[in-house]
Image (cartoon, helix red, strand yellow):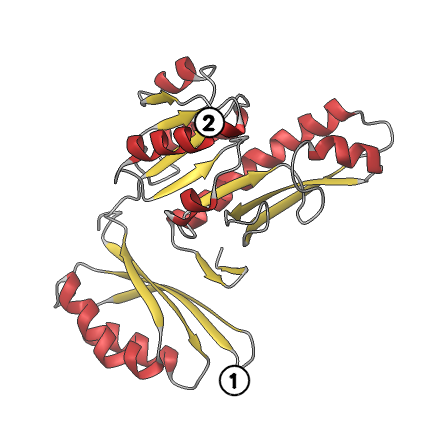
């Protein structure tokens, strides 16, 4: 059976009896073979319910559109679900935005080339030209869009939107050291992933490793989150930490942090691509 012959169903709704039975019975009746199911309830009596279900598609008796219409009528409307079905055969398109630091972006490109990230990459955009050769070495298009001052932001963002067009399903800020405007972010709701070089909510904004060093922390971290209009306040997807000591200088913290950033961002992107994340307000449910 082909690697792309499966689909994923994500569900979010008020918790109530019968949700799992209704969804699984519907899929069984239409020829689906369920291979993975995860669920979470905030409170079994009156809370919120979340589910991720993966199923094989070759023996389905309905096409995509008919299956989704039938599910909406038979199951989703009954439980007032917020839901969607995605298909592994439809590879999401991921555009990467990066500045001068290359470690997070190159980690993603390396994993993509090895087949660990099931995405297509239409382009890489940067406000520096430094990474052109490295990016083009992967056979990818590189676009240099300068943004040397806040005054240039509107023009730079419009240029990026013109380049992206309808080519990208989601964006990854792989150490893109510019703040995106609320208008730009609104184009990609819950579809921009950022890696912040700090264990949020501590040390938001610029140069968090210096802030951490000056505070004398014993743990540093990295945080991958969805971007919202509020700086570094979006729903957190993944975090990790490393221990440091009084003998570590700022450069030591930055070196350790780069390793964390690579791993945390890669996990967050993979979970997004595999539909393992449900955003609920300012939180995420991650079925990893």
Q: Quadrant of residue 117?
A: top left
Q: Secondary structure at mark 2?
A: helix
The quarter of the displayed image where residue 164 is located? top left
> Which x, y percent locates residue 113?
36, 28
Q: Nearer the viewer, residue 138 or 21?
A: 138
| Res 110 quadrant in image | top left
- Number of numbered discs visible in the structure rendering: 2
Q: Residues within 10 Å of mark 1 (few under 14, many from 20)?
A: few
7 is higher (above) or lower (below) than 111: below
Q: Can residue 85 be seen in the rendering of this structure?
A: yes
Query: On residue 46, which mark appears?
Result: 1
In screen coordinates, is 10 left or right of 287? left
Q: Is 171 located above or below residue 238 in the figure? A: above
Whole-percent x, y for residue 47 in the image: 52, 79
- Please tell me whether residue 32 is drawn above or below residue 175 in the rendered image: below
User: Whole-Å distance between the Cαs marked 2 and 1?
Assistant: 49 Å
Nearest the viewer among 195 and 107 is: 195
């Amino acid at each position: 059976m082909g690697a792309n012959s499966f689909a994923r169903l994500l569900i979010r709704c008020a918790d109530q009896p019968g949700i799992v039975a209704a969804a699984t019975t519907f899929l069984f009746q239409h020829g689906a073979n369920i291979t993975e199911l995860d669920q979470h309830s905030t409170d079994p009596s009156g809370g919120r319910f979340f589910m991720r279900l993966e199923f094989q598609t070759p023996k389905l008796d309905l096409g995509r559109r008919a299956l989704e219409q039938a599910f909406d009528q038979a199951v989703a409307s009954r439980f007032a679900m917020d839901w969607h079905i995605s298909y592994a055969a439809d590879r999401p398109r991921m555009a990467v935005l990066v500045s001068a630091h290359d470690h997070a972006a190159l980690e993603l490109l390396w994993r993509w080339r090895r087949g660990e990230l099931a995405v297509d990459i239409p382009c890489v955009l940067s406000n520096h030209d430094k990474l052109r050769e490295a990016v083009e070495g992967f056979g990818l298009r590189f676009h240099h869009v300068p943004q040397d001052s806040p005054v240039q932001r509107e023009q730079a963002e419009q240029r990026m939107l013109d380049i992206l067009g309808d080519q990208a399903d989601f964006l990854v800020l792989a150490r893109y050291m510019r703040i995106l405007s609320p208008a730009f972010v609104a184009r990609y709701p819950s579809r921009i992933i950022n890696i912040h070089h700090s264990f949020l909510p501590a040390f938001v904004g610029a140069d968090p490793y210096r802030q951490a060093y000056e505070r004398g922390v014993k743990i540093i971290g990295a945080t991958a989150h969805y971007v919202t209009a509020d700086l570094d306040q979006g729903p957190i997807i993944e975090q990790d930490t490393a221990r440091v000591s009084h003998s570590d200088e700022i450069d030591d913290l930055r070196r350790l942090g780069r390793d964390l950033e690579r791993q945390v961002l890669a996990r967050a992107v993979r979970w997004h691509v595999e539909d393992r994340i449900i955003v609920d307000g300012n939180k995420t449910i991650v079925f990893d």
